[in-house]
Amino acid sequence: MKKTILTILILTAFAISCKRKSEESKNNTKSFKVEQQKEVTSQIHQNIITKNKGKYASEINFFDKNNISLRLKKLTGVLYKEMVKNFNVQTPIVSENSIYKLTGCLKHNCPAYMVTILYDSKGDNLNVLIDENGKLAKFAEKDKIKLTKSLKIK
């Protein structure tokens, strides 16, 4: 009788200790996965726009082959070459609330051809607005980026 009770106690203790170790290993795995996801997210949103706030597109070779220029080319399609060619008079990259903006226009004739590039670093979303003689062409990767009044005038 004593052997039976002793055996039951030992098996119960063994089962409880195994369960605790299993729960601890599950918790460690979950936290590791979350840390990996955070690192990947921060890498996605760092690019030539976010790293060069205050600089002009020509200073940073903005339209050279990089992730953003490739995305812009895909987004604007056949208008990409014309956009790059007419991106002469430029404003520096400005931002507000994780929305970045840069503009460029035709030298000596901004009203004839004006490009505004918007980037939302939280949503990793690009928008391009091309105003050609009053006709506005809008391109959005995901959603329309909403500008604040103060960012519009910057």
Image (spheres, rainbow, N blue to C red):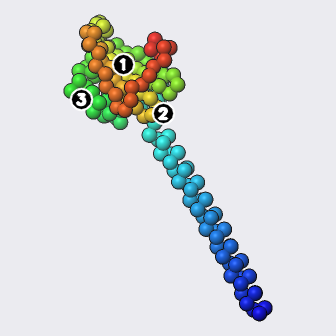
- Where is residue 87 drawn, in percent x and y? 31, 18
Residue 57 shows in the view: no
Position of residue 13 relative to residue 24, above or below, is: below
Residue, x 64% and y 70% (percent of image)? 19
- Where is residue 40 drawn, in percent x and y? 47, 45
Quick one: 80 or 133, which is closer to the camera? 133
Tell me the quadrant of the picture where the N terminus can be found: bottom right
Residue 104 quadrant: top left
Residue, x 28% and y 9% (percent of image)? 134
Quick one: 149 or 15, which is closer to the camera? 15
**Looking at numbered disc 3 in the image, what kind of residue is underneath it?**
Gly
2 and 1 marks in contact (CB < 8 Å): no
The residue carrying mark 2 is 122
Q: Sequence order check: which comes first, mark 2 or mark 3?
A: 3
1 and 3 marks in contact (CB < 8 Å): no
Residue 141 shows in the view: yes
Q: For the residue labelled by badge 2, is the local secondary structure a helix, a strand or a loop?
A: loop
Q: Label 2 to label 3, Cα distance in Å?
A: 25 Å
**Looking at numbered disc 1 in the image, what kind of residue is underneath it?**
Thr
Q: Which mark is residue 77?
A: 3
Position of residue 118 relative to residue 3, above or below, is: above
Residue furthest to the left in view is: 78
- Where is residue 34 drawn, in percent x and y? 54, 50
Q: Sequence order check: which comes first, mark 1 or mark 3?
A: 3
Q: Sequence order check: which comes first, mark 2 or mark 1?
A: 1
The residue carrying mark 1 is 116
Please give left or right for residue 39 compared with residue 134 in the image: right
Q: Label 1 to label 3, Cα distance in Å?
A: 16 Å
Residue, x 31% and y 9% (percent of image)? 110
**Looking at numbered disc 2 in the image, what kind of residue is underneath it?**
Lys
Q: Label 2 to label 1, Cα distance in Å?
A: 19 Å
Residue, x 34% and y 13% (percent of image)? 89
